[in-house]
Amino acid sequence: MLLQDVKGRRYLITLEAGATFHTHKGRLAHDQLIGSAEGTVARTDMGQKLLVLRPTLADWVVKMPRGAQVIYPKVLALMVMAADVQPGMTVAEAGTGSGALSIALLQALAPGGRLHSFERRPDFADQARRNVERWFGKPPDGFELHEGDVVEGIGTVGPLDRVLLDLLEPWLVVPGAAEAVRPGGVLVCFVATVPQVMRLAEALESSARFGLVETSEAIFRPWHVDGLAVRPEHRMVGHTGFLVSARRVDGPWPSPGRVP
Ligand SMILES: C[S@@+](CC[C@H](N)C(=O)[O-])C[C@H]1O[C@@H](n2cnc3c(N)ncnc32)[C@H](O)[C@@H]1O
């Protein structure tokens, strides 16, 4: 459950009969929450009010245990849309990391889809598996977590409809992805720096198997809305990363902006 206090502080807890949630403003017995409706307000023994909700995926992704840095929820939404992920598709992603993108993809692929997820660090793969299974409450259908290098593995899981990459050197995956993705398929990569964008765009264009290479920056600016005080928040996340997307084509095709 997600508990939020009146100051906006959020706590994610797993309910267990007989357990107690502690804050600096009192204790709350889990038994008080088990069976209660979402959206109700509970009180600690010191009278602190706590709003009780089930966490959304966005709540879970930022609070779940992590090995690797996760992709943040707003960028996850952009990636799923940019890759046009649909139920029933076969998709590959790497690296699995903490499993945040895996969960977003599994939700978009169901029912009937298959996600091949590659992670070369066994400890991260274990953490991701635990996070995915905890979110779905069981091992989700169609989830295949491969412990190993995606550069070697991607050729073994095609034909693919989509590939999503969140790793340091996505350009190394381009030759394998060119073989594994069906014509018309989509590749979407999340990278943090300009040199990565440049190397990736170069690899995609020189492969002659990917076209429509597009790059955009994910920027979100939250607003403060309170009476007449309606303005951007004073603080924001200045940089998360770039999305580079491309379509699998059957021959060289110029990117927008490169047309002679
Ligand atoms: C930033 S994390 C991915 C986070 C993940 N997208 C999430 O949302 O939780 C990058 C991961 O890629 C893995 N990685 C890097 N290169 C890899 C490769 N060639 N094959 C498989 N995994 C790789 C790293 O071990 C790391 O766990």
Image (cartoon, grey):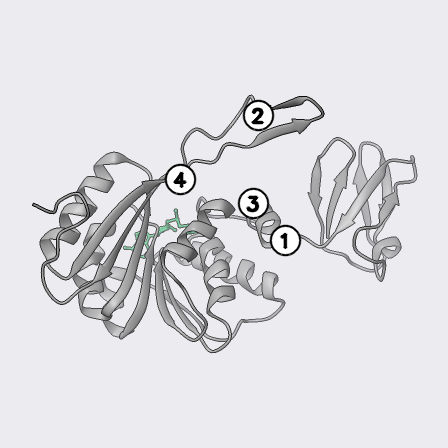
Q: Quadrant of residue 218?
A: top left
Up the image or down, 254 lies above or below 239; here it is below
Are the residues at dot 2 and dot 3 in contact (C-beta closer than 8 Å)? no
Q: Quadrant of residue 9?
A: top right
- Total numbered badges shown on the rendered structure: 4
Which of the two labelled residues, at mark 2 and mark 3, occupies the earlier sequence position?
A: 3
Q: Nearer the viewer, residue 21 or 221?
A: 221
Task: Single out the residue that lies furthest toward the bottom.
Answer: 112
Are the residues at dot 4 and dot 3 in contact (C-beta closer than 8 Å)? no
Q: Nearer the viewer, residue 114 or 231?
A: 231
| Residue hosting label 4 | 218
Spot occupied by residue 122 in the image (x, y as percentages of width and height): 40, 58
- Judging from the image, what secondary structure is the residue with disc 1 in? loop
| For discs 1 and 4, the disc positioned in front in the rendered view | 4
| Residue hosting label 1 | 56
Which of the two labelled residues, at mark 4 and mark 3, occupies the earlier sequence position?
A: 3
Task: Single out the residue that lies furthest toward the left.
Answer: 260
| Residue hosting label 2 | 233
Q: Residue at x 48, y 65 (%)?
A: 108
Q: CA distance from mark 2 to mark 1?
A: 23 Å
